[in-house]
Image: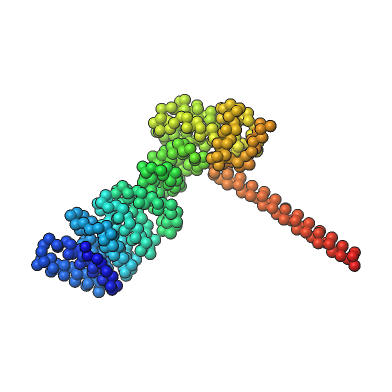
Amino acid sequence: MATIVNTTEEEPMLAVVRFTAELAWADAGPEVADPEVTRLCLEAQEHILAGRWLDMASLMLASADLLLTSPFRVPDKDLECILSVICSLVTKAGSEDQALQITDLICAKLTQQADDKPALRLKVLFSLYNLLPSPYGKAFVYKKALELATAGKAAECIIPSFKNIDSFVSEWGIGNLEQRELYLAIARILKDHKGTTKEYFNFLNKYLATFKGSDDDSATIGDAKEEAVAAIIEFVKSSTLFQCDLLNMPAVAQLEKDEKYQLVYELLKIFLTKRLDSYLEFQTANSALLKDYGLVHEECITKMRLMSLLDLSSHCSSEIPYSAITSALQINDDEVEQWIVKAIAFKILDCRIDQLNQTVIVSRHTERIFGMPQWQGLRTKLGVWRGHVASAINTIQANKVTDEGTQGMQGLMIR
């Protein structure tokens, strides 16, 4: 197997052309092969000398195409090296437009036959991504990588990059519609991938949040119904999620008047605004619906008891009597502390138990919905705390002045 050695700035490109040409014409014999190899190399040299990098990319990709399909097989390491040399052409382009044209050619070639060496193709795409200075170019390549990962069933190769999506979106500067397409593509990749339930829910949220309820969304918001339902079911199913903003999202709110999904919206409303008794009433009337969506009644009761405890905490000043807890959670007196400990373990409640007075003294609880009223409440609390801090500082300064004055008087008396 030939080895590509970089001895001059342009030689890797010529070496790639020569290598692929020799491989393509290997079965034709020297009399036919040699002239063809020479012709391709001379053509490559002309493109290099004239700075025709787009033409060079077309030439190299046409040759490299043979390496990506059988019966022409080369070791993955050599193939990656060849494709990386081709990707480096974007750094030589004379303009951003030309670099994007080269990028388009490379992406088109790599996304063909996605099920053949998808991991290698994705690796090359990410190399191309890192070579591009243009935010638009980076966004374009990443989108192609998502398409390749989906078609090639290589989700595990791209999922690690999802944790950086927020910084990517900020860097790319893409608009709301582009973000919507991105989040939906990611959510669909995560949907069928084991162990990514939380991430799947998060990207469903991001997708649904792109619908602002404006006139611009009126024609497309209906397309989000399936994802809105999926997000609701994921939230209800989750044993670790106790807060979400779904209820206030226009893409979710549209379900309230939807004949097919109205009950799903009602279920979400129960989990976010009501208590266990409301859920039990709903379950009695709609048990088949819950089964259809894969919801387990006992698991829903467990979550709804914790939700009911949060609701009690939000409506009590600070102390919750045991009797209120047993009534809301529909449990016995000796089970109260068990459920309090469970809530503390989930980090949705900070409190102490007063066994003597049969009360729970709450210092902090998770709000099931954190919307504008909660933000306003937080602002009020911060204002009060700020006033307390200012008062404490004034008191300390006043005491300091008094102490200094007293010490001064004592000094005069001693004299």
The image quarter containing residue 28 is bottom left
- Can residue 211 be seen from the camera position used here? no
Tell me: 317 left or right of 43.
right
* Residue under the point 16% across and 70% down: 38
Q: Is residue 13 above or below residue 214?
A: below
Quadrant of residue 164 within the rendered picture: bottom left
Front position in the image: 162 or 108? 162
Taking the spot 19% from the left edge, 69% from the top edge, the residue there is: 41
Q: Quadrant of the C terminus?
A: bottom right
Q: Where, by quadrant of the figure, is residue 77 drawn? A: bottom left
Task: Name the residue rendered at 55%, 39% in the picture.
Answer: 345
Residue situated furthest left in the rendering: 31
Which residue is depicted at the point 84% across and 60% down?
406
Residue 9, how many percent across, how many down? 29, 72
Q: Is residue 412 above or below residue 241?
A: below
Horizontal placement of 169 versus 20: left or right? right
